[in-house]
Image (cartoon, coloured by chain):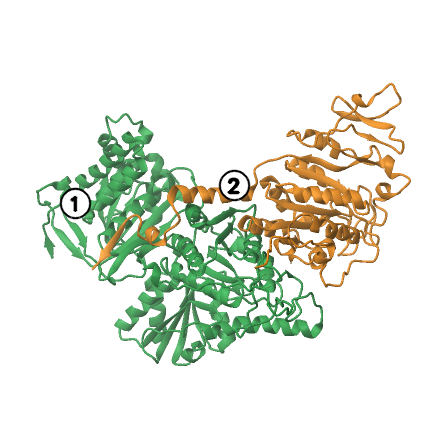
Chain colours: A green, B orange
Amino acid sequence: MATYTKDPLLGDRLSSKPVHELNAATVRFCGDSGDGMQLAGTQLTNTSALAGNDIATFPDFPAEIRAPAGTKAGVSGFQIRFANTEIFTPGDQVDALVAMNPAALVTNLADLIPGGILILNSDAFNAKGLEQAGYAKNPIEDDSLSGYQLFPVDMTKLTRLAVDGLGLGVKESDRCRNFYAMGLIFWLYGRSTEPTMRYIEEKFGKNPAVAEANRRALHAGYNYGETTEAMVSRYSVNKAQLRPGLYRNITGNQALAWGLVTAAERSGCELFYGSYPITPASDILHELVRFKNFGVRTFQAEDEIAAITSAIGAAFGGALGATASSGPGIALKGEAIGLAVMTELPVLIINVQRGGPSTGLPTKTEQADLLQAMFGRNGECPLPVIAARSPADCFDVVHEAWRIATRYMTPVMLLSDGYIANGAEPWKIPDVETLPSWKVSHPIAPSNGHEFLPYERNERLSRPWAIPGTPGLMHRIGGLEKQDITGNVCYDADNHQHMVNLRASKVAGIAMDIPLQEVSGPERGRVLVLSWGGTYGACATAVQCAQANGGLVAHAHLRYLNPFPTNLGEILQLYDRVLIPELNRGQLRMLVRAEFLVDAVGLNKVQGKPFAVREVVKKIEDMLA
Amino acid sequence: MTIDTILPVLTSKDFSSDQEIRWCPGCGDYSILAQMKKVLPTLGVPPEKTVFISGIGCSSRFPYYVNTYGIHSIHGRAPGVATGLKASRPDISVWVITGDGDALSIGGNHLMHAIRRNIDLNIILFNNRIYGLTKGQYSPTSLLGQVTKSTPMGVIDNPLHPLSVAIGCEATFVARSVDVNIKHLTMVLKRAAEHRGTSFVEVYQNCNVFNDGAFDYATDRDTKAETLLELEHGKPLIFGKNRDKGIRLNGMHPEIVPLDGSIKEDDLLFHDERTTEPTLAYLLARMRYPDFPEPIGVFRAVDAPRYEELLNNQIADARRQRGPGDLQKLFNSGETWTVE
C-alpha cells in the first residue's frame, strides 16, 4: 500500500511521491573501477543497517586496480540486499541497477529482474563508451531496455552543475558522481543521508571544497528523485525483527581481525600476526595494524613462508601466532605448517579462499581449498580444519580455532572465502565479559627434580607448552620425527608408527570436544542439504524455500570439517538422499563419501560467484521429484 | 631469608645437552660447538633465556647439542622463525645457526631481509662450500670449477660470497673466523653476541668427508700467516709470518706492499670497523685467496635501530597516545544501532 511521508530533507513538505512498502530490496551499483562504486555500496549498506534492516552485501570487483576506463574488464560492482526479516544472502537478482557506463550495463543487466529499476548515467552512453561495451546502437535510444523501468539521468552534467562554483576541475567534479548516484538511490528507498554526511565530514573534512562538492552531489541526486517527473514512486523497507541488542556492520576480514585481538586478550596471550599481502586476505593485516595499543604485533614478512615461520617462532615464545593468506600463499606455507604439526605448536592459519588454481581469480570467491587444508602437506599431517559461514561468524570461529589450538597444541586451519571476507552483515555486539575466556598456562620446572619431558601427554594427548625464559625446561624441538615422551630425535620404526598414530588420534579426539552437529528441519526426511563455509546463506535460504513448498528437507551446516562432529554419520543415515552444494568440484562430498560411505550428490559451481538461492532450490526440487 | 642476588657462575657444562653428537668424526662443526659453549657462559645470559634456531643441513643439528631452548626448523627458514620469536620476545637472546646452502640458496631471501631489518639475532653461517647432508653436491659458495657429485665437469656458476651478501644488505655487524682458530673464533662469537642488531658471522668450516681441505690455506700452520689477515679496529692491515707485508689502497684497489722501509705503516690501509660507510668492509670482503690474504675478524660493527625495538616502541607509543586497548570500546566504536 502506498503512503505519503514527511521527508527530513524536504523540510515540512510531504514528499510528492507515494511510498510503497517492500519486505526487501536488492540494489546494485556498477561502474568503472574508478567510479567509487564500492563506496556507494558501503554507504547504502551503512544507512540501511542504521535504519534497522537486516543486510547482506556482495562487493564484486576486478583484480586490476584500474583497467582501461570504460572497458568491461574494469567494471566494479557492489550489491546489497536490505530486508525487514532476517536474510542470509545478498539476493540472486537485483531490483534496482545503477550503471554508470555502457560496459557496466552490458555486464550486469542479466541480473536485473524483469521490470526492475534501471538507472543509467546517460552522459556516459557516448560513441566511445558504447563501442567499448560492444553496443552497435545506444540501448537508451532503441527498445532493447523496454522490459525495465528505465531512468536515463545526465549524471555527469548534473553533478558538474551541482558542484559549480567550488573551484573544482572537471576531473574532481566528476569524481563526485557516485555521491549523486547514492543520493538518487537514498531518495528512492527513503534512506537517511545523515550517516553519509558524517562520512563525508570525517573523510574529506580537511578539504572543504571536496567535502562540500560531495555533499552537494549527494543532495542533488536526492532532490532529482523528488523533482523529476520520470520517477513516480518511492519504496520503503521497514526494520527487521533482529534479536534485541546493540548492532554494527562487520565484514568477514574485519571480524577475523577483531576475533584475533579478542581471542588473544581473553586467553592471556599476546597476538603476533605474520603475513604477506595477498588478495583477499590483506584487509586482515590492514585492520590489525590499527591495534598496536592492544599490544598487537604485526609483521609484514618478505614472503608467505616467513609469514608463517615467524608465527611459529612467536608461538614457541608463548604468543598467539597467526598468519593468513589465500590459496597460493597457503601452498607456500605447506612445509612450515608441517613443522607446526611436528613441533605441536598452536598456530592459527587462515585461508581466505579465492578462485584457483595458481593465481586463478584473485578477487573472486571459491571453496576449492578444502582438500588442500586437509591434505596439502607432505606425510601424514593431520590438523583441525574449521570454516566460517558468514562475515559475523568469523569472529566466533577465530575464538574456537584458538581454543582448539591451545587445548590440543596444534596448528588449526581456519577457512574463510572472498565472499565472506568482503561481505558485510549486522553483528550483534557482544558484551566482552560474556565471551569465552581461558587462561593459557605454561609449565614451570618440576620441583621434584624430575626431568622435563616436552612430548609427555595429558588426557587430550596434548603436550606441554613450555616457553623460553622458564628455568629448567630447556628443550629442543624440530621437524625431525620425535621420540615419544622425550621429544628427542628418533628414527626408530615402531616409534614413527606410534607417533604418526598419536598425532592422528590427538586431532581425531577433538571431535569429543566440539558441539554435536545441529540440523534445521525435520529429523528424518527426503533430502539433507549438507553445506560448509560461505554457502551457508544460499543453502539455508534454499532449504527454507523448499520446506515452505512442503518438501521434507533439512539443512546441516558444518563448522567443523576436521574432525567431523561425532553425530554426523548418524545424521546422514536419517535422510533418503544427501545433497552437498559446494563452490568446487565436490571436495566435501569426497570426504563425506570416504568417511561415511554415503552416496552424496553434489551441486557444484566454479564461476567465481556464490550460489544463487534459486540454483540450490532447483537442485533440491529435482531431487524431491 | 636468603640472598639470591648472587648469580650462579655458569660453565660450558651448563650449556651442554645430553644428546649424542652425530656429526662425522673430524668435522669442523665440533670445534665451533666447543667454542660456542665456551662463549655462552661469559655472556651473562642464562641457558633458559637463550634460543638456538637452525634450518636444515649438517650445521643445523647444532641446537640439539646445546642445553638451551631450540628449534631445528625447516630448510632456509631459520631467520623467519627467529624473527617471530625475537619480535615478540625481545627478552630472549636468539642465535641462528645456518650453512652455506641453508642461508644462501633456499633461505637467501630470509637472510637478506633479517639483515636489512637489523633485528637482534646472531647469525652464524658455517661455510664449507659443499652440501654435506645430501652427500656432496655443490653449494652456492662452491668455487668455479669445483668438481662435486653434481658437477663432474666442474662448477660453472659464480659463487656467492657470504660477507659480500651481508654487507650488500648493509648488515650492522659482519665478521669472519675459522673453525679451528680457537681463540679467534671465541673472540668473534663473543663480539657477535655483544652487538645489538643482526650480527652476521661467516665461519670457514672444513667438511672432511665431501670437501676436505677447502680451507687448508687458512688453517695450515705454515701458510696461514701469509694467507690470512687479522683485522683489528684502528690498526693498519699487516700480515705475513714476519709481519712484513701490508695492504695499501691504490685508488679503489687494494694492493699488497712490502714493509721494507720505503713504505711505512702509516701508508697502509687502516681498519675502521665503525665507519657507517660499508664500502671499506665490502672492499675487504672482496680480498680473496690466492690473490690476497683473506681478512678475518670484525669487518663492520655499527649501531643502527633494531626492528624489535622499533616495533615495541610503536606499541608503547600507541598505548601512550590512545591508552591501552579496550575491546568493548572498540566493538562499540563508529556507527551502531539498537534493536529493541
Q: Chain of mark 1?
A: A
Residue A154 seen: no
How many numbered markers are drawn? 2
Looking at the image, which is closer to me, A566 or A229? Answer: A566
Amino acid type of the residue that numbered disc 1 sits on in the rendered structure: Met
SS at mark 1? loop
Residue B51 quadrant? bottom right
Residue A70 lies left or right of residue A459; in this view the side is left
Q: Position of residue B248 (x, y in %)?
A: 79, 24
The C terminus of chain B: image quadrant: bottom left
Residue identified by numbered label 1: A231
Q: Chain of mark 2?
A: B
Q: Position of residue A432 (x, y in %)?
A: 35, 59
Q: Is residue B193 above or below residue A419?
A: above
Q: Residues within 10 Å of mark 1 (few under 14, many from 20)?
A: some
Q: Nearer the viewer, mark 1 or mark 2?
A: 2
Q: Residue at x 57, y 68 (%)?
A: A463
Q: Residue at x 78, y 42 (%)?
A: B184
Q: Residues within 10 Å of mark 2 (few under 14, many from 20)?
A: few
Q: Residue furthest front?
A: B1
Q: Residue at x 24, y 36 (%)?
A: A215
Q: Position of residue A590 (x, y in %)?
A: 50, 70
Same chain for labels 1 and 2? Say yes or no.
no
Amino acid type of the residue that numbered disc 2 sits on in the rendered structure: Leu
Label at residue B310: 2
Q: Position of residue B103 (x, y in %)?
A: 68, 47
SS at mark 2? helix
Residue A370 lies left or right of residue B13; in this view the side is left
Q: How far is the residue under mark 1 from the one under mark 2? A: 59 Å
